[in-house]
Amino acid sequence: MKKITILFIYAFFILISCSEKDVTLRRLEDVHKAEKKLAKDPNDEEVILEVLNAAQNGGREVRAEAVWLLGKIEADIAYSDFLRASVEDPDFNVRCLAVLGLGRLEANNPEAIDRVKRAISDTDLQVQIEGLKVAGRMNAKELLNSILESLSSKNKWVRMAAVEALKDYDDGRVDRSLNLLASSDSDFAVRSIIKQVIEYRENKNTENIEAVEIIEEE
């Protein structure tokens, strides 16, 4: 009976070990070494694949470091991983860095827009803020409603990020929302950044009008 039990336990551990995906970069220092290799040769496919594997299957800190590295080198091959990790990874740091990676790749398509929209409504405030930053750079009309909704967040840092994200959006609702928030928000820092964004938008509109007038005169 003991032999059968021992064999069963042995077979069980073999099954577990075989089911685990091999992660070459198991430690943070391994990812740092990979970063140095990619600094010398950004197109080293073998190293990039190792980093991709670590981003998917490594421990929490290793995944975060690997996703950061993939975003830093702006690897197009990591696009699908950024999409997945930005909403599926259980660690908020990884989700945050995955959204940042999408922003660095300047991915402005329905898939990326959907992930950024979901990031803006993430349960973690830092992911929300990073999503708003990327949404501001993307300047996609599909994200405007999500940004406007963030103006009513209870967290002042989220509201400030939303205000900043709206500065280049060409829509009448933006000016109305900013003016309303400027007169109702109780936080000085929020009101201060609203003032800066409103001035920026006014100067931008003036420059655009002057540019049109010059073209018409010519």
Image (tube, grey):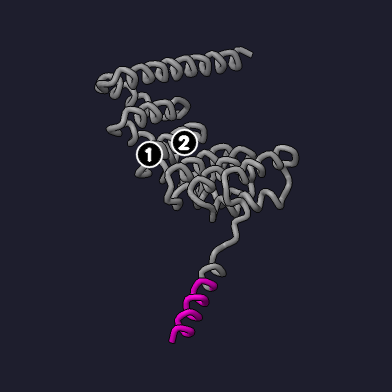
Quadrant of the snapshot with the N terminus: bottom left
**Residue sitting nearer the eye, 48 or 135:** 48
Residue 166 falls left or right of residue 188? right
Q: Earlier in the sequence, mark 2 or mark 1?
A: 2
- The range drawn in magenta is 1-14
Most distant residue in the bottom direction: 1
Q: Which mark is residue 135?
A: 2
Q: What residue type is labelled 1?
A: Ser
Please provide percent x and percent y for residue 190: 33, 22
Please report contact status of discs 2 and 1: CB closer than 8 Å, yes or no.
Answer: yes
The secondary element bearing badge 1 is classed as helix
**Residue sitting nearer the eye, 99 or 217:** 99
Quadrant of the snapshot with the C terminus: top right
- Whether residue 152 appears in this view of the structure is no
**Residue sitting nearer the eye, 170 or 209:** 170
Q: Residue at x 32, y 28 (%)?
A: 156
Please provide percent x and percent y for residue 65: 55, 42
**Residue sitting nearer the eye, 211 or 38:** 38
Read off the residue under disc 1: 146
